[in-house]
Image (cartoon, helix red, strand yellow):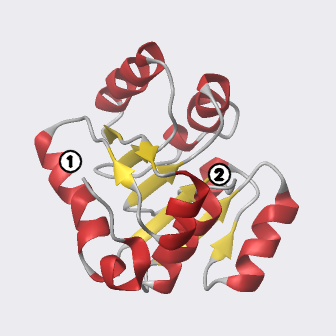
Amino acid sequence: MTKIAFLGLGVMGYPMAGHLANAGYDITVYNRTNSKAKKWISKFPGNMEYTPSKAVEDADFVMSCVGNDNDLLDITLGDSGAFSAMKNGSIFIDHTTVSGDVTERLYQKSKTIGISFVDAPISGGQAGAENGVLSIMCGGDEFDYEKACLLYTSDAADEGLGVDL
């Protein structure tokens, strides 16, 4: 079974992670505010962890949806950051709208540590996330993009995670 870690349970990430969980994916969530993660696991099937590095252990895909450049750098490269614990060959998919400099930095770093990076900012707002009708603009290596697309176009689409890629 495909294992996913989802980092960031704000107004967009919370329902996005929920749609993936309801589609049957094995999902572990992390949020800086533990109470949000605890609320999420009380509503959806899945697990939570207290650090990004613990959440991503053994994950095939790691998704993030956090607030800004600094938040993304913190959950990826900071103390207990995801990049330090991701398994070789896994794919990090970032849904945060961040600067091109941060995206390029994380893409280049991913290549040096044996993981992949797909930049995938989202459009559609909170209602789109809740109703599973987001648009996702993707950038990255074609092979990684194709693998990431499978998450959004398989069973998840039947569970309300249909997206325009």
Q: How crowded is mark 2: few (under 14 residues within 10 Å), some or many (20 or more)?
A: many
Label annotation for residue 99: none
x and y percentages locating residue 107 in the rendered image: 34, 27
x and y percentages locating residue 42 in the rendered image: 77, 83
At x 78%, y 48%, the residue is 32
- 2 vs 1, front mark: 2
At x 76%, y 57%, the residue is 50
x and y percentages locating residue 52 in the rendered image: 64, 49
Q: Is residue 94 visible?
A: no
Q: Which residue lies furthest to the left in this view?
A: 142
- Where is residue 30, by image quadrant? bottom right
Residue tagged 1:
144
Label annotation for residue 8: 2
Q: Are marks 2 and 1 in contact (CB under 8 Å)?
A: no
Q: What element carries label 2?
A: loop
At x 42%, y 78%, the residue is 160
Q: Residue furthest right?
A: 35
Residue type, numbered disc 2 = Gly
Q: Is residue 128 above or below residue 114?
A: below
Image position of 122 (left or right of 37): left
Q: Is residue 109 above or below residue 121?
A: above
Residue type, numbered disc 1 = Asp
